[in-house]
Amino acid sequence: MRDKLRVVLENKKEEYINHLLELLSRDTQVIGHGIEGGREKNGQDYLEQVMESMGANVVREHITEELVQRGIETYSEGNPGHNYDDRYNLVADFKGGGGRSLMFNGHVDVMPPGDLSLWDSDPFKPEIRDGKFYARGVADMKAGLMASVLGVKLLQDAG
């Protein structure tokens, strides 16, 4: 199976890279440290489209103050008092064969890029230079998130 995965990965490499570049090009920055809102929908819409095209059942879980309060009570986690307009979690379920399950968790939000004059390139126009990706959110955590999604796609593509 490993050899087959390597062959499929090599054959689909450009397609997979293009998915990452598309997600990186989406402005998903938070506004006012997330308190005033955020642009995550730009990335969430793309991820939803990709996962649905892969056959996933995708549900949008809209964030509400009630949901955040429940998270604080249950897990001691959450950020109350934020603007949640157009901000939601995606839950994607890929049906398997009844064996063990695997869960991935990630986020598309990024902090604003700051002083653009300090960037070598536009932070939302991803570039590959010397085999490295340059864009806002590539390290935290759009590349990891897309790797999770495309790991499933690789298994699907390999049959």
Image (cartoon, rainbow, N blue to C red):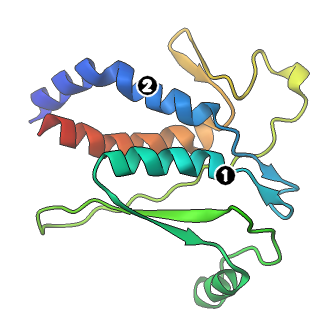
Instruction: Identify the residue position indicated by label 1 in the image.
Output: 40
Q: How many marks?
A: 2
Q: Tell me, for residue 56, which label it has, or none.
A: none
**Label 1 is placed on what type of residue?**
Glu
Q: Earlier in the sequence, mark 1 or mark 2?
A: 2
Q: Position of residue 157 (x, y in %)?
A: 19, 36
The quadrant where residue 97 appears: bottom left
Q: Residue at x 25, y 37 (%)?
A: 154
Asked if 60 appears above or below 2 in the picture, the reply is below
Whole-Å distance between the Cαs marked 1 and 2?
21 Å
Q: Residue at x 35, y 40 (%)?
A: 150
Say if mark 1 contacts mark 2, CB within 8 Å.
no
Q: How would you rate the neighbour count of disc 1 (Cα within 10 Å): few for under 14, some for 14-19, many for 20 or more?
A: many
**Does dot 1 land on a helix, a strand or a loop?**
loop
Q: Position of residue 81 (x, y in %)?
A: 83, 77
Horizontal side of residue 146 vs 54, given as left or right: right
Asked if 82 appears above or below 11 in the picture, the reply is below
Q: Residue at x 8, y 36 (%)?
A: 1
Q: Nearer the viewer, residue 50 or 29?
A: 50
Q: Position of residue 61 (x, y in %)?
A: 54, 71
